[in-house]
């Protein structure tokens, strides 16, 4: 059996009230462990895309996928962990910045290709995008200056190349025809 | 047309003939238009939980969708146990609840509760309808979801002002749901693989579950069993999917199943699971379950396949269609050796035989009802010892004739569900097998049963205990009995008579048959208070968490007199 790892799952869901509660409730009551969840509009009107990071082995991810499919408002579910993908997170961080160390902070910001989006007398707000590791590294380096506030969006991920992120339905152990008809999705 | 009228029109389009419910303020506009729709018969219950169970019993007995109605707040929350019961057992039920007016939602209004939030995990889907114009399409969708694929309950919550506002009534012909397309036909290659496995198996067994009954796959199951000569084990909810007087019928497996079934599963090299989900009561400890068996799993719900046991050949689809296709791939065969081995097991572990006793053993009651009805009645039970004895001692000959709360294990189910079953099947004798514990949870519906002249026959298996809990305490808690005895039960005969129900008391083995015949001969509802041997236990008993072959098989013939068939 495969070891417990992080799986990135992308789901296309109906943009209806309560859909987030349905999905998060499912995770809670079935005891699935998600470390990360982000939601936003997709390219299709009335459909939203959710990206979550699930911790578990192959069996757990298969169950997550199948249970998600059982929700009427979930249109498509894909485990894109094995695919070449771009995964990004956006973070905002408010750091103490007195006159004497502000230039040092600005150098770090430049190295990480981040931006300073707000400057006050003794703080700056930095905006950074990247994968979790990059953001964690920047935070580690900023920590000695004094981090006052942090906000992170959670991971969003897209498959590289021409393939669509929702293009390869995952229904392990069950035949592909159990997945919703891809053609039927507008 | 008002929202309330749209609801009634829509229900009529769905072929609904009967609804169980109880009105209140928020749902009132719906009730006020009901007289305009006499084709929709409404049965006024005493408690909303019973409306949900009655709709459930109606749905199971008829194969149609059951409908229950409640008002907002406490009315809606009272449905919860009934909906959870239907969810666990895959029963198509539509619950319509009133909600406070839209402007009051979220303000902690009088009788406001977030019923869509509450029922999220115990419904297949639910809706809060915020526009009158959406009512018709929502109801259409709800029925489609409830009755297709793996059936289940769907709740529709409607604010009061959505019921009173008007909109054009257009009932859609079709439903398109991007995220819901149940797979009905099994995969051809997988069916061929399954046929090959069956042909090569030495010790195959069929495990038939509720899915066979839901899919109406009785003939197909029988076809597979007879063609491939595979014995059929039926799960609790699979009982009556296969005639129990058939030579290949094995009865129930698992915690209180037949000992020979658990041993046969242990020896089997191929399990053909149809419309069942390897519930923990069937498998016991999973790591030791069916250690030598490959598994063919046929189920309409892909999430059940591979959830609990490793599956060799998964086939997602409707049991009827898959079995039909599978039988066509199979050449008739014989399995004399395996059938003989099973026959020997049945001789060595005769858990299907009744013990000789002078006392009124509860099993005798079930056996007697089985004999008198020729196994053709509809049997509805609650949960506990009486339920297990019904499953064990009654010989089910009629397809879809056993209605019981399996997954959720809801005590009290037997009274309202029997009411629903009798409404659905006025042509059949309905026996409600009740425990004195569960009966007292829902017996208020006796009034409804009399009101509607439903000739339900009640067999009260009265031992003055919450018997299965007492059994757990006796067997596994060193006999320390805590809160399991009803030291003062009502006089059930007087109680039934107070409701207007013909009632009898049986304290002796010899009175049993006469009372059953008399109850059956009586035109209306009847109740028999069977004062059974209170200390009797259900055997076999697999201790929770153990492997299914580690059974307590019960008193031996030597210590307790001879066994008889």
Image (tube, rainbow, N blue to C red):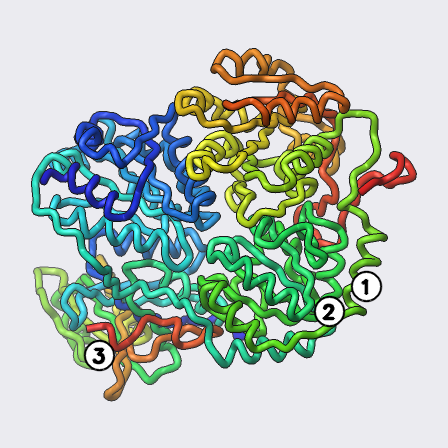
Determine the secondary structure under disc 1.
helix
Residue B476 image offset from top left, x and y in percent: 73, 38
Q: Taking B60 as reference, is B76 above or below it?
A: above
At 73% across and 69% down in the image, what residue appears? B203
Determine the secondary structure under disc 2.
loop
Which mark sits nearer the N-terminus, 1 or 2? 2
Residue A77 image offset from top left, x and y in percent: 33, 70
Q: Are marks 1 and 2 in contact (CB under 8 Å)?
A: yes
Task: Point out the frontmost of discs 3 and 2.
Answer: 2
Q: Are marks 3 and 1 in contact (CB under 8 Å)?
A: no
The Cα–Cα distance between marks 1 and 2, rounded to whole angstroms, is 9 Å
The chain under label 1 reads B
Q: Residue A163 lies in what quarter of the image?
A: bottom left
Q: Which residue is mark 3?
A: A112
Q: Which residue is mark 1?
A: B341
Q: Which residue is mark 2?
A: B203
- Dot 3 crowding, Cα within 10 Å, few <14, some 14–19, many 20+: some
Q: Residue A97 lies in what quarter of the image?
A: bottom left
Q: Residue A70 lies in what quarter of the image?
A: bottom left
Horizontally, residue B313 falls left or right of residue B32, namely right
Q: Taking B290 as reference, is B18 above or below it?
A: above
The Cα–Cα distance between marks 3 and 2, rounded to whole angstroms, is 65 Å
The Cα–Cα distance between marks 3 and 1, rounded to whole angstroms, is 73 Å
């Amino acid at each position: 059996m495969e070891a417990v790892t992080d799986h990135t799952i992308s789901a296309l869901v109906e943009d209806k009230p309560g859909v987030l509660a349905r999905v998060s409730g499912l995770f809670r009551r079935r005891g699935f462990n998600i470390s990360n969840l982000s939601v936003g509009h997709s390219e299709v009107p009335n459909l939203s895309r959710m990206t979550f990071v699930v911790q578990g082995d192959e069996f757990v991810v298969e169950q997550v996928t199948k249970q998600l499919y059982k929700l009427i408002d979930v249109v498509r579910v894909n485990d894109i962990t094995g695919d070449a993908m771009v995964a990004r997170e956006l973070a905002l961080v408010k750091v103490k910045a007195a006159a004497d160390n502000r230039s040092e902070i600005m150098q770090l910001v430049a190295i990480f290709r981040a931006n300073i989006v707000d400057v006050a007398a003794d703080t700056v707000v930095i905006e950074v995008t990247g994968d979790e590791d990059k953001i964690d590294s920047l935070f580690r380096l900023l920590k000695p200056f004094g981090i006052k506030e942090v906000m992170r969006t959670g991971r969003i991920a897209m498959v590289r190349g021409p393939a669509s992120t929702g293009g390869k339905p995952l229904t392990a152990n069950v035949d592909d025809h159990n997945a919703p008809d891809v053609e039927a999705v507008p | 047309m008002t929202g309330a009228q749209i609801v009634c029109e829509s229900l009529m389009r769905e072929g609904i003939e009967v609804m169980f419910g109880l009105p209140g303020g928020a749902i009132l506009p719906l009730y006020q238009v009901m007289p305009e729709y006499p084709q929709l018969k409404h049965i006024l219950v005493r408690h909303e939980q019973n409306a949900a169970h009655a709709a459930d019993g109606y749905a199971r007995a008829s194969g149609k969708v059951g409908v229950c109605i409640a008002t907002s707040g406490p009315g809606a929350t009272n449905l919860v146990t009934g909906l959870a019961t239907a969810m666990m057992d895959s029963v198509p039920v539509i619950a319509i609840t009133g909600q406070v007016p839209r402007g009051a939602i979220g303000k902690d209004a009088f009788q406001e509760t977030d019923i869509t939030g509450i029922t999220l995990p115990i419904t297949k889907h639910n809706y809060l309808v915020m526009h009158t114009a959406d009512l018709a399409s929502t109801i259409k969708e709800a029925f489609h979801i409830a009755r297709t694929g793996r059936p289940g309950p769907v709740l529709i919550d409607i604010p009061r002002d959505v019921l009173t506002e008007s909109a054009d009534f257009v009932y859609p012909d079709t439903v398109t749901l991007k995220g819901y397309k149940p797979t009905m036909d099994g995969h051809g290659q997988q069916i061929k693989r399954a046929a090959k496995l069956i042909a090569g198996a030495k010790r195959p067994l069929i495990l038939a579950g509720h899915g066979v009954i839901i899919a109406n796959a009785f003939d197909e199951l029988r076809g597979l069993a007879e063609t491939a000569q595979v014995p059929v084990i039926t799960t609790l909810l699979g009982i009556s999917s296969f005639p129990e007087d058939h030579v290949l019928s094995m009865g129930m497996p698992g915690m209180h199943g037949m000992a020979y079934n658990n041993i046969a599963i242990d020896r089997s090299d191929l399990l053909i699971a149809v419309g069942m989900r390897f519930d923990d009561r069937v498998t016991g400890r999973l790591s030791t379950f069916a250690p030598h068996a490959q598994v063919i799993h046929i189920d309409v719900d892909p999430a059940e396949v591979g959830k609990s046991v490793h599956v060799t050949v998964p086939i997602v689809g409707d049991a009827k269609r898959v079995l039909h296709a599978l039988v066509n791939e199979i050449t008739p065969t014989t399995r004399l050796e395996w059938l003989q081995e099973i026959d020997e097991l049945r001789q060595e572990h005769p858990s299907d035989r009744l013990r000789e006793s002078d006392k009124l053993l509860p099993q005798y009651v079930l056996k007697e009802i089985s004999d008198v009805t020729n196994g053709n009645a509809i049997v509805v039970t609650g949960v506990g010892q009486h339920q297990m004895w019904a499953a064990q001692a009654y010989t089910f000959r009629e397809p879809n004739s056993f209605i019981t709360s399996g997954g959720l294990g809801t005590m009290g189910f037997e009274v309202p569900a029997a009411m629903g079953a009798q409404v659905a099947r006025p042509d059949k004798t309905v026996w409600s097998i009740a425990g004195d514990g569960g009966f007292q949870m829902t017996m208020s519906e006796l009034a409804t049963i009399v009101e509607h002249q439903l000739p339900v026959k009640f067999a009260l298996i009265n031992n003055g205990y919450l018997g299965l809990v007492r059994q757990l305490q006796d067997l596994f808690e060193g006999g320390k009995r805590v809160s399991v005895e009803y030291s003062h039960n009502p006089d059930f005969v007087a109680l039934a008579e107070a409701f207007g129900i013909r009632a009898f008391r049986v304290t002796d083995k010899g009175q049993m048959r006469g009372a059953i015949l008399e109850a059956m001969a009586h035109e209306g509802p009847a109740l028999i208070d069977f004062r059974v041997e209170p200390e009797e236990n259900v055997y076999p008993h697999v201790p929770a968490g153990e492997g299914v072959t580690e059974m307590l098989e019960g008193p031996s013939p030597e210590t307790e007199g001879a066994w008889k068939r």
